[in-house]
Amino acid sequence: MPNNISIVVSAPSGTGKTSIITKAIEENDRFVFVVSTTTRPQRNGESEGESYYYVSQDDFKQMIVRGEFLEWAVVHQNYYGTSKKEVDRIKGLGKIPIFDVDVQGAKQLKGKIKNAVFIFIVPPSIDELRTRLVNRGTDSEHQVSIRLNNAVNEMRDYRIYDYIIVNHDLTEAAEDFKAIIRAERCNVKRFAPDMIRL
């Protein structure tokens, strides 16, 4: 697979996106997770520079003014963004970046990143998503309601993606993710520049 490809992944909160991305990275060392910058408080088990880059709202807004983000959005009352510096770091290593962004971020990246594959991961149902969010135990009842409402709105924008994975089962969803990447490796458009020279 050419190194100029990028993988952009979105999903409603609680759908299993992070677990699927983690599996992909563990099995292919050419993939590197793009660490986002956020104003969200750091959770237990998260670490600076691996989970997120944590900044204050004032610092985030200054980064916006300086044009440091490829994309940014306000999600669940917090700011999230992908810095150009982070993507340049990964590309400089000769690796393939995997973006974990919400629908707003995917829309912004759509016009800025060439050779990107856009994958949308969805839950089997809204009821199942509610169960997963409650069982996760990291959000209040009010926050769960906000996330469910956002999930419905996000899923209406499915058409901007190239592929959809329904996460009934994490192992099966991870296999679907790998199958998409394998298919993209064989896509004619990836070979076109070299084939033209023949």
Image (cartoon, helix red, strand yellow):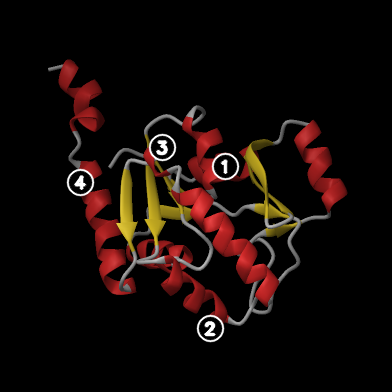
Q: How far, Cα to Cα, is label 1 from label 4? A: 26 Å
The disc placed on residue 131 is: none
Nearest the viewer among 66 and 167 is: 167
Asked whether the beta carbons under mark 3 and mark 4 sit within 8 Å of each other, the answer is: no
Dot 3 falls on a residue whose secondary structure is helix
Q: Which label is found at residue 183?
A: 4
The crowding category of the residue bearing disc 2, from other C-alpha atoms within 10 Å (few below 14, some 14 to 19, many at least 20), is few
In the image: residue 52, left or right of residue 183: right
Question: Which residue is label 2 attached to?
Answer: 135
Q: Please name the amino acid that badge 3 sits on.
A: Ile
The residue sitting at 59% across, 63% down in the picture is 147
Measure how far apart labels 2 and 1 are at the Cα level.
Answer: 26 Å
Task: Name the residue beneath numbered marker 1.
Answer: 104
Quarter of the picture containing the C terminus is top left
Q: Secondary structure at mark 2?
A: helix
Marks 2 and 4, how far apart at CA: 34 Å
Between 66 and 173, the one nearer to me in the picture: 173
Mark earlier in primary sequence (2, 3) = 2
Tell me what residue is drawn at x 39 percent, y 59 percent. 122
Pick the residue in front: 142 or 175: 142
C-alpha distance separating marks 3 and 4: 19 Å
Any mark on residue 160, and which? 3
Circle 1 — which element? helix
- The image shows residue 196 at horizontal and vertical percentages of 18, 16
Compare marks 3 and 4 and give the one earlier in the sequence: 3
Tag nearer the camera, 3 or 4: 3
Q: Amino acid at mark 1?
A: Gln
Q: Is residue 28 above or below residue 137?
A: above
